[in-house]
Image (cartoon, grey):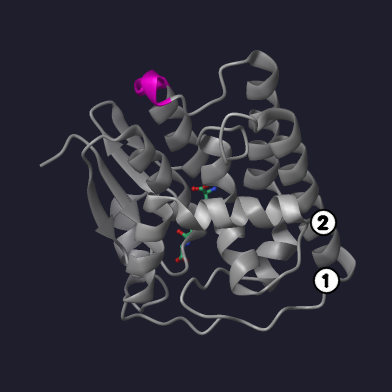
């Protein structure tokens, strides 16, 4: 048994689970994985057994349980500094923290109108109103990151960081719903879909037996 166990929801749907799972893969530590199937009669009961908020993800660690996606990523960045989960330079790191905070606390319209469903190609919604504004903002964030900080690799800050974890579900959504974005963002989407850990998660999502009518 490993020192670390991550408790997640269905890989096809659970955006918050995907984020710290990618960070765990990036640090390269051995970890166990337990999945609570969402939207079943016993889901709440099962979640209450493992999470103080009855939400996933939760990371069980030798230092105790951590029950929030961004807090898990922060813990991994501090515990495994060699993985460079944050950019090295203070300005880039502050920028990365700001775009992660923006994702962690925002984009509610995108979340509710374009739920993640990694195994299905879905009709493109009209990019108008609040949804259009939020997608445009993400496109702008990605272009800004890539142009200012992305010289050393294909990810938002060059090498893979927590910012890529936080935006990974949006990569899944924009590609699954066939949304048009700038060339810079389209290249970033391709780089993320080629990331081995992301590809492993998507492949597992495709063979999950549970469906949720969203
Ligand atoms: N702020 C939390 C949000 C966690 C969250 O909303 N998780 C969803 C799954 S993606 C959940 O557990 N939902 C419970 C349910 O659907 O019953 C985090 O960042 O970890």
68 horizontally vs 123: left or right = left
- Residue at position x 65%, y 65% in the image: 174
Is residue 6 part of the magenta span, yes or no?
A: no
Q: Which residue is mark 2?
A: 136
Image quadrant in which you'd find residue 152:
top right
x and y percentages locating residue 102 in the rendered image: 70, 42
Tell me where residue 127 appears, x and y as whole percent.
83, 71
Q: Is residue 90 above or below residue 207?
A: above
Under circle 1, the secondary element is: loop
Q: Nearer the viewer, residue 107 or 56?
A: 107
- Position of 8 with respect to 141 (left or right) is left
> Residue at 58% of width from left, 40% of height from top?
155
Q: Which residues are magenta?
A: 78-83
Instruction: Judge whether 132 appears above or below 64 on screen.
Output: below
Real-space CA distance between mark 2 and mark 1, rounded to the nearest whole angstrom: 9 Å
Q: Quadrant of the N terminus?
A: top left
Query: Residue at (57%, 41%) from the top-left corner?
Result: 154
Say left or right for 47 vs 213.
left
Residue 82 belongs to the span the image colors magenta = yes
Which label is found at residue 1? Answer: none
Circles 2 and 1 in contact, beta carbons < 8 Å: yes
Which residue is labeled 1 in the image? 127
Label 1, ligand 1: CB separation under 8 Å:
no
Residue 201 appears left or right of 91: left
Residue at image location 47% in from the left, 42% down from the top: 68
Q: Nearer the viewer, residue 47 or 130?
A: 130
Q: Nearer the viewer, residue 99 or 112?
A: 99
Q: Quadrant of the C terminus?
A: bottom right
The picture places residue 110, in percent across and down from the top left corner, at 71, 64
């Amino acid at each position: 048994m490993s020192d670390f166990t991550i408790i997640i929801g269905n890989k096809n749907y659970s955006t918050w689970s995907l984020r710290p799972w990618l960070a765990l893969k990036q640090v390269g530590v051995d970890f166990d994985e337990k999945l609570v199937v969402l939207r079943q009669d016993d889901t709440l009961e099962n979640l209450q057994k493992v999470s103080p908020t009855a939400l996933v993800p939760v990371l069980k660690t030798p230092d105790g349980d951590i029950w929030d996606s961004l807090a898990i990523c922060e813990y991994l960045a501090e515990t495994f500094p060699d993985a460079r989960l944050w950019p090295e330079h203070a300005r880039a790191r502050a920028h990365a923290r700001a775009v992660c905070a923006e994702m962690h606390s925002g984009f509610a319209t995108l979340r509710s109108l374009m739920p993640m469903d990694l195994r299905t190609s879905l009709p493109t919604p009209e990019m108008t109103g609040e949804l259009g504004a939020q997608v445009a903002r993400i496109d702008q964030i990605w272009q800004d990151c890539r142009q200012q900080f992305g010289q050393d690799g294909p990810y938002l800050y060059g090498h893979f960081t927590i910012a890529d974890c936080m935006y990974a579900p949006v990569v899944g959504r924009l590609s699954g719903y066939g949304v048009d974005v700038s060339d810079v963002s389209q290249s970033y989407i391709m780089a993320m879909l080629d990331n081995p850990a992301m590809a492993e998660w998507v492949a597992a999502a495709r063979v999950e037996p549970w469906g949720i009518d969203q």
